[in-house]
Image: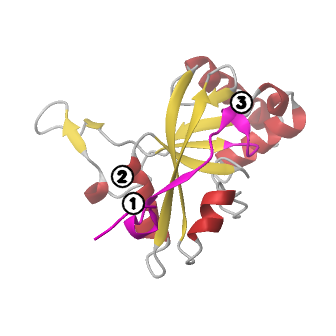
């Protein structure tokens, strides 16, 4: 078990006390990519700011810092646990063979929902973690090439997200606003 910093980005509605008291907020958007849940950016605050600037550009955004007790025993980790990735791939292959999945039009969220409904997935896991490759445009990446003149690179701030199934999953801590600075208690100009 590892203590991991997480960042939750929400729209700034001028209600910092409410945000801090009730964060995180569940995401039920139709385009959620890991299914319904509480979404966080793992470790890199730069991704929380990128999301805020991209999604909440007109009204502004708030970043709330949390921490959790990360464990691959309780988190279906599609980034750091290759056995979990193999299990996910097996689910995809199972659905394809039974023609329950259309190869070009099915999503990760649909497969996760299948696992939740058809297996003990939600009893076994409290969260899912994944790296959203090509989430950010090439100008927003912080990269270092492996070999000069080649396309391969190391992404130094990968868009890794954690989606908690319940608000208290992975012993999630209370949240504390860390951006914008005028919402931070004791901040002076």
Picture coordinates of residue 49, whole percent (x, y): 40, 59
Q: Nearer the viewer, residue 184 or 125?
A: 184
Q: Give the structural element (helix, strand or loop) at label 2.
A: helix
Q: Is residue 16 visible?
A: yes
The mark found on residue 50 in the picture is 1
Colour theme: secondary structure
Give the answer, above or below, for where 59 lies relative to 176. below
Q: How many marks?
A: 3
Check if residue 173 falls in the magenta segment: yes
Q: Residues within 10 Å of mark 2 (few under 14, many from 20)?
A: some
Q: Residue at x 83, y 35 (%)?
A: 98
Q: Is residue 62 left or right of residue 137?
A: right
Q: Give the structural element (helix, strand or loop) at label 3.
A: helix
Q: Is residue 132 left or right of residue 15?
A: left
Residue of label 2? 46
Q: Outermost residue, bottom direction? A: 58
Give the answer, above or below, for where 20 lies relative to 155. below
Picture coordinates of residue 155, whole percent (x, y): 31, 39
Q: Nearer the viewer, residue 159 or 184?
A: 184
Give the answer, above or below, for where 143 lies relative to 8. above
Q: Residues within 10 Å of mark 1 (few under 14, many from 20)?
A: some
The mark found on residue 99 in the picture is none
Of marks 2 and 3, which one's residue comes earlier in the chain? Answer: 2
* Rendered image quadrant of residue 81: top right
Q: Which residues are magenta?
A: 164-189
Q: Nearer the viewer, residue 169 or 84?
A: 169
């Amino acid at each position: 078990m590892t203590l991991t910093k997480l960042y939750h980005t929400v729209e700034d509605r001028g209600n910092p006390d409410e945000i801090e008291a009730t964060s995180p907020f569940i995401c039920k958007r139709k385009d959620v990519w890991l299914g319904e849940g509480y979404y966080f950016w793992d470790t890199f605050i730069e991704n929380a700011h990128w999301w805020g600037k991209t999604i909440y550009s007109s009204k502004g955004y708030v970043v709330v810092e949390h921490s959790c007790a990360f464990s691959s025993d309780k988190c279906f980790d599609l980034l750091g646990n290759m056995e979990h990735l193999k299990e996910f791939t097996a689910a995809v292959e199972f659905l394809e063979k039974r023609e329950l999945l259309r190869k070009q039009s099915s999503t990760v969220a649909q497969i996760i929902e299948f696992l939740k409904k058809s297996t003990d997935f939600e009893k076994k896991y409290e969260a899912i973690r994944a790296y959203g490759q090509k989430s950010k445009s090439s100008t927003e990446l912080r990269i270092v090439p492996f070999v000069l003149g080649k396309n391969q690179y190391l992404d130094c701030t990968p868009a890794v997200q954690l989606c908690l199934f319940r608000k208290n999953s992975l012993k999630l801590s209370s949240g504390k606003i860390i951006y914008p600075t005028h919402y931070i208690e004791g901040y002076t100009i």
